[in-house]
Amino acid sequence: MSDNWVVQHLNNTFDTWNDKLEEVWKLLTISPASFKGGGI
């Protein structure tokens, strides 16, 4: 791929976006018992 700074910036942005989406998905799909021991 090109070494264009715009392309690099977009790639970094999408990498960050994907990391954050992965974190959100983990939080949404974790069972209450697994999350911090299930306590309130």
Image: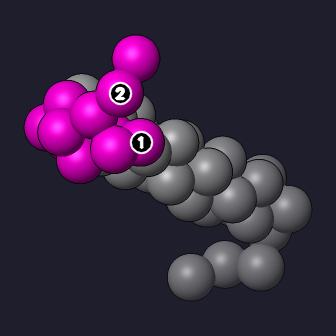
Q: Start and end of the magenta stretch? A: 29-40
Circles 1, 2 touching at the beta carbon (< 8 Å): yes
Q: Quadrant of the N terminus?
A: bottom right
Q: Which residue is mark 1?
A: 36
Tell me the CA gap for discs 1 and 2: 7 Å
The structure's colour scheme is one colour
As drawn, the residue found furthest toward the front would be: 39
Q: Position of residue 37 (x, y in %)?
A: 33, 44
- Secondary-structure class at tag 1: helix
Residue farthest top in this picture: 40
Q: Amino acid at mark 1?
A: Lys
Residue 33 screen position, x and y as percent: 18, 39
Residue type for callout 2 = Gly
Residue 40 occupies quadrant:
top left
Dot 2: element = loop
Q: Indicate whether 40 appears above or below 34.
A: above
Q: Is residue 26 visible?
A: yes
The residue pinned by badge 2 equals: 39
Q: Is residue 32 magenta?
A: yes
Q: Position of residue 6 (x, y in %)?
A: 78, 53
- What residue is rendered at 19% in x and 30% in y? 32
Closer to us: 38 or 13: 38
- Residue shown at 77%/79% (left/top)? 3
* Residue 22 coordinates in the image, percent (x, y): 37, 49
Report crowding for label 2: few under 14, some 14 to 19, many 20 or more residues within 10 A (C-alpha).
Answer: few
Name the residue rendered at 77%, 54% in the picture: 9
In this rendering, would 40 be left or right of 7? left
Apparent side of residue 9 relative to residue 7 in the rendered image (left or right): right
Q: Nearer the viewer, residue 17 or 23?
A: 23
